Image (cartoon, coloured by chain):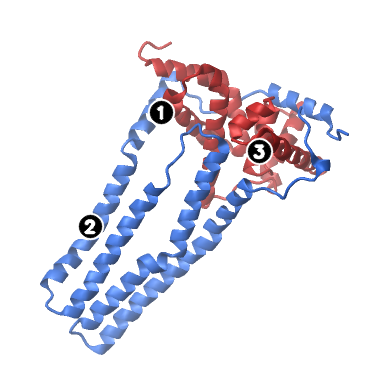
Chain colours: A blue, B red
């Protein structure tokens, strides 16, 4: 038995199809094309430019540490700075790899394919966010502490600098875990629910074609 | 047509002008305030503009356009969410009513349309897409092509979405 209120659906379809369309920015054809060309020109350099700027920024931050490594005679300090440089290089590579590892589908791909892509990206962000301590913060903490403890400064200064670094790392990790819990995990669950909806339907729920 | 336009510009403007009502309805289903609707409209046009060279068969244009519009809308909503902007749901009744009042003239037909939009806003992204395509009078086969689902999957999910929508519309009407 068809328990669907077909008349109601017909009426709703009618209302939907006959609704007056209003809204949308009031642009002339020339203005619209100009806006789109401008937007296209802005995004043209895209991924390469983003990666280049990201890598340049990391390189810039690394330069002073490279100078310290070359000029510092103390082996412990050198080791600390080398850990820092290694950590930064790894973080830079990881950011570039993350942006490029999942291929974006074409704009007119089926909706579910886009959702799968969205889910893969969100999972990747969530994982990077969850493990930030290990691949970003810990090399920084270890490098800074090793370098600090090799420096010819008094004990209180060493303890103070190490404590400040640990505090910075702790706060960053706490904020990051908060973002992971409150943003990435709910978004991941929402997408998973969209892609894997409810349990199988019972025979009584079998659909009828309209 | 402006003589300064390229061949693709003309094709783009023609496609947008023919399908403007469809695009606006999708914008309204996914974005609730006028500002977001305008942003989403521009984003959809941009995706159409970018993807137009890939549209080889004009007969495929409708499915192609729905896919682009829905993909852009879902990405738009998710970007808004990830930037921390709270999604407007129909739990914010006062805000929604205010928005609907400014967008729709008050008569019985528009009242029904307002209830429909209010209920659609409470569906999830996939249900919204299915209901929108169903209301646009697409066949199961066409909906399946847009969504990338099998026809039987479309049938089951759409059946559930329709039931949910009717319940939501009743709730909206009773309030």
For disc 3, the neighbor class at 10 Å (few under 14, some 14 to 19, many from 20) is many
Residue B136: x and y in percent read: 67, 26
Q: Residue furthest right?
A: A1
Pointer 3 indicates a residue of which chain?
B
Location of the C terminus of chain A by quadrant is top right
Cα distance, mark 1 to mark 3? 27 Å
Provide the secondary structure element on which disc 2 rests. Answer: helix
Does residue B104 appear in this view?
A: no
Q: Residue furthest bottom?
A: A155
Q: Please, is residue A76 above or below residue B102 in the view?
A: below
Cα distance, mark 2 to mark 1? 34 Å
Q: Which mark is residue B128?
A: 3
Pointer 1 indicates a residue of which chain?
A
Q: Is residue B24 left or right of residue B107?
A: left
Q: Are marks 1 and 3 in contact (CB under 8 Å)?
A: no
User: Do badges 1 and 3 share one subunit?
Assistant: no
Residue B135: x and y in percent read: 70, 28
Mark 2 or 1, which is nearer the eye?
A: 2
For disc 1, the neighbor class at 10 Å (few under 14, some 14 to 19, many from 20) is some
Residue that carries the numbered disc 1 in the rendered image: A36
Q: Is residue A155 left or right of residue A115?
A: left
């Amino acid at each position: 038995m068809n328990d669907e209120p077909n008349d109601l659906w017909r009426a709703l379809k009618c209302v939907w199809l006959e609704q007056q369309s209003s809204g949308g920015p009031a642009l002339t054809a020339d203005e619209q094309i100009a806006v789109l060309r401008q937007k296209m020109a802005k995004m043209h350099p895209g991924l390469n430019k983003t990666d280049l700027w990201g890598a340049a920024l990391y390189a810039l931050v690394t330069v002073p540490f490279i100078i310290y490594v070359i000029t510092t005679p103390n082996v412990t300090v050198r080791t600390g700075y080398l850990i820092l440089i290694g950590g930064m290089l790894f973080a830079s590579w990881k950011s570039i790899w993350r942006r490029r590892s999942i291929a974006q589908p074409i704009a007119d791909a089926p909706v579910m394919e886009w959702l799968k892509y969205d889910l893969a990206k969100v999972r990747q962000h969530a994982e990077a966010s969850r493990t930030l301590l290990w691949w970003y913060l810990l090399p920084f903490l270890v490098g800074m502490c090793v370098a600090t403890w090799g420096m010819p400064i008094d004990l209180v200064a060493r303890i103070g600098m190490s404590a400040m670094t640990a505090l910075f790392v702790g706060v960053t990790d706490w904020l990051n875990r908060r973002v992971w819990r409150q943003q990435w995990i709910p978004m991941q669950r929402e997408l998973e629910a969209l892609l894997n909806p409810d349990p199988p339907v019972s025979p009584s729920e079998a659909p009828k074609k309209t | 047509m402006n003589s300064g336009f390229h061949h693709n510009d003309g094709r783009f403007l023609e496609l947008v002008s023919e399908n403007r009502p469809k695009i606006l309805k999708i914008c309204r289903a996914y974005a609730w305030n006028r500002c977001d609707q305008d942003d989403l409209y521009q984003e959809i046009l941009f995706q159409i503009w970018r993807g137009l060279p890939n549209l080889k068969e004009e007969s495929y244009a409708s499915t192609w356009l729905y896919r682009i519009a829905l993909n852009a809308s879902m990405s738009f909503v998710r970007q808004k969410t990830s930037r921390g902007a709270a999604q407007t749901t129909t739990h914010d009744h006062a805000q929604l009513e205010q928005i609907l009042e400014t967008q729709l003239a008050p008569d019985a037909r528009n009242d029904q349309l307002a209830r429909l939009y209010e209920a659609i806003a409470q569906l999830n992204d996939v249900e919204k897409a299915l209901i929108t395509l169903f209301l646009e009078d697409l066949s199961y086969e066409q909906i399946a092509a847009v969504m990338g689902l099998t026809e039987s999957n479309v049938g089951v999910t759409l059946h559930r979405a329709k039931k949910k929508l009717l319940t939501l519309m009743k709730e909206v009407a009773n309030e």
